Amino acid sequence: MGKLLLGIDIGTSACKVAVFDEDGRVLAQASRDYRVYYPKSGRAEQDPEEWWSAICEGIKEVLSGREAAADEICGIGVDGQSWSAIPVDRDGKVLCRTPIWMDTRARDICERIKQEAFAEEIFEVAGNDFLPSYTTPKMLWFKQEMPEVFAKTYQFLQSNSYIVYKLTDRMSQDCSQGYGIHFFDINRLTYHEELANKLGLSQELVPALYRCDEVVGEVTKQAAELTGLKAGTPVVAGGLDAACGTLGAGVYQVGQTQEQGGQAGGMSICTDKASAHKKLILGTHAVPGLWLLQGGTVGGGGTLRWFRQELGQGMSFDELTKEAEKVPAGSEGVLFLPYMAGERSPVWNPDAKGVFYGLSYDKTRAHMIRAVLEGVAFSLEHNLRTAKETGVEAGVLNAMGGAANSRLWTQIKADVTGKTIQVPASDTATTLGAALLAGVGCGIYKDYEEAVRRTIRITRIQEPDMERHAVYKKMMERYLELSEKMQEIY
């Protein structure tokens, strides 16, 4: 075998597959879309078999050219969206579509659990509040609402662990996705059997735990036939997309911070201890021995995509942001709450809605576009301020995701937060992070310091303008006031 690495990313709207050389250069990449199903209000589902079909097609494409051959790939890493609850039987057959991170069907179950005597114990063990987006409430929902499926379920898998299973025929649970399971002890990185039993579940319902860079198995003959991969290629456990993206953005040391600008937004601050906050998300980093204090928002690049689709009249993203450049910082009083599908941290309200405030006859589409860009930046700052309440403060932000390609949007985020923002090769950060896990796990790199040093390149640095920061500090207070007052109306 050669020394190429394959990274697979299971996103919400599409999967991405990329082949990297040892220095992090993309040799070939492919993407395939798939559906999100919305069968009822509050429900959002995907079909894991559609993920697998899309990934098989994507792998075949990247291996079809001269850039990469199957026998040159020495390791495979898989990352995926959070908080899946894929019920599979003993043969690995998917029993029904999985609720995804946007799904809030388990709201009533969460309210009931929060009234139980052991509610505080859940937070002490898991480091996360008991909220409907997470995996555990969805497992309980299956038990309560679909007992016939629950009875047939051998184990619940995460998005990446399902694809790892399809590749290797072995079920696994990586530590970075453990935070969605409330009987996963966030400090000890083990399952808490007693708490699982109190919740009416069993630790047998989830697979054995693996380090993210630990080899789970090898590509089977059947998977090789479906994908074009070479049978016997090692596959590591992989991890959470945000954790892999954080690594792929060059964040692997305490105090470093990743800023997410994909479909959704948010941030991940790297720490050396489990610093929990009920309004944030705490998980282990894909890099062993580290944790990530995270803020995950609904509003990210998806907000501008929505605006372009509904109000952009066929304009490109570049044309939209050029128009926004005409408007001064603060959008002359126009504010936007980017809660387009409810909101996650630190608001945690599935009923929250997107809101434009401050419109008048003298305001234009350009004001609205800039307000959208600023609203996403304000949601980022809201999470950073919440993290400071635990004593965890971000330093320089490493940006990733499609939004990082916009100089204006990146500058607005720098100006709102008052933080310097570094932009690595953002479009491939998540798949690169997954590939780096495989590289460490398979011995291509001796450690993460070497992996990051060899593969991560900063393409630009944007410093905050402190005059605009002063304007945004005032607007931020209005944003927080509007957000709080709107909770009553929701």
Image: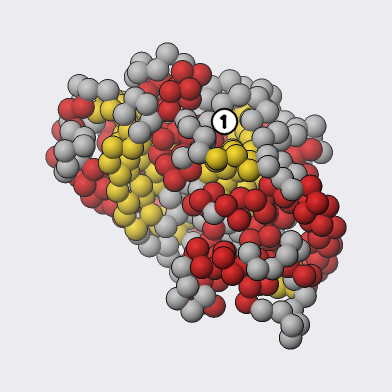
Identify which residue is drawn at 81% across, 60% down. Answer: 475
Provide the secondary structure element on which disc 1 rests. Answer: loop
Q: Quadrant of residue 468?
A: bottom right
On screen, 292 above or below 481? above
Residue 34 % position (x, y): 35, 59
On screen, 477 above or below 250? below
Give the quadrant of the C terminus. Answer: bottom right
Residue 478 % position (x, y): 83, 62
Q: Which residue is mark 1?
A: 251
Q: Quadrant of residue 451?
A: top left
On screen, 479 above or below 229? below
Residue 333 % position (x, y): 79, 70
Left or right, 358 with respect to 136, comes to right
Q: Nearer the viewer, residue 42 or 25?
A: 25
Left or right, 432 with respect to 258, comes to left
Identify which residue is drawn at 74% across, 48% down. Answer: 465
Please tell me how crowded label 1 is: few (under 14), some (14-19), or many (20+) other residues with Cα within 10 Å: many
Identify which residue is drawn at 30% across, 48% down. Answer: 30
Identify which residue is drawn at 39% across, 43% down. Answer: 9
Q: Quadrant of residue 422?
A: top right
Q: Nearer the viewer, residue 236 or 270?
A: 270
Amino acid at pointer 1: Val
Left or right, 214 with respect to 128, comes to left
Residue 52 % position (x, y): 29, 48
Give the quadrant of the N terminus. Answer: top left
Residue 364 appears in the rendering = yes
- Looking at this view, name the residue that lies furthest to the bottom: 361
Residue 161 appears in the rendering = no
On screen, 459 above or below 413? above
Left or right, 430 with respect to 4, comes to right
